[in-house]
Amino acid sequence: MAEGLINKYFPDIKAYSAGSNPSGRVNPNAKKVLIEEKAWKNEYHSKTIEEVLNHAPFDLAVTVCDNAAKECPVIPGTKTIHIPFEDPDGKDYEEFVKTKEEIKTRLFSALRMHFRV
């Protein structure tokens, strides 16, 4: 969800997301949230870190779950910050909405500070 939300609300930033253990699918509730937010693009899909690294270099890497913070590779020359969110996967739709709002509050605040926007 963070990739879609960042790409919608920060047009001067290009976000890519990857999972430390990607499922190969986008959760239907995550997709629904992004569609409702008008932030969904058909190009979004579950990606590995290796696939995303093809787009390097990056200005910033953000880990959003504790597992990713431990497993995310160090990207030379890239600042990494950790802003954890509870993974709503397997939970009701309302939990996805809550996570979306947390992303828009906590993660967006960190992006504004980092990129001074």
Image (tube, rainbow, N blue to C red):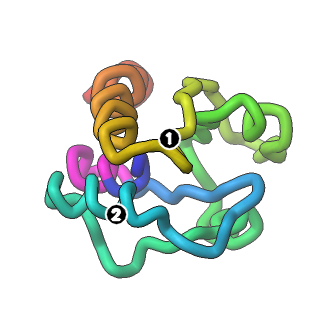
- Out of 44 and 109, give the one closest to the viewer: 44
Residue type for callout 2 = Lys
Find numbered disc 1 in the image and state the secondary structure of the residue it sits on.
loop
In magenta stretch: residue 12:
yes
Residue 21 falls in image quadrant: bottom right
In the rendered image, residue 43, in percent from the top left (x then y), is placed at 40, 79
The residue tagged 1 is 88
Which is nearer the eye, 24 or 104?
24
Residue for point 26% across, 45% down: 10
Closer mark to the observer between disc 2 and disc 1: 1
Q: Which amino acid does label 1 sit on?
A: Pro
Determine crowd level at label 1: few under 14, some 14-19, many 20+ residues with C-alpha closer than 10 A: some
Q: In this view, does 111 lie above or below 15?
A: above
| Contact check, label 2 and label 1, Cβ < 8 Å | no
**Residue sitting at 63 percent across and 69 percent down?**
47
Q: What stretch is highlighted in magenta?
A: 5-13
Residue 58 drawn in magenta = no
**Which residue is nearer to you in this view: 30 or 52?**
30
* Residue indicated by mark 2: 31
Q: Depth check: 73 or 28 in front?
A: 28
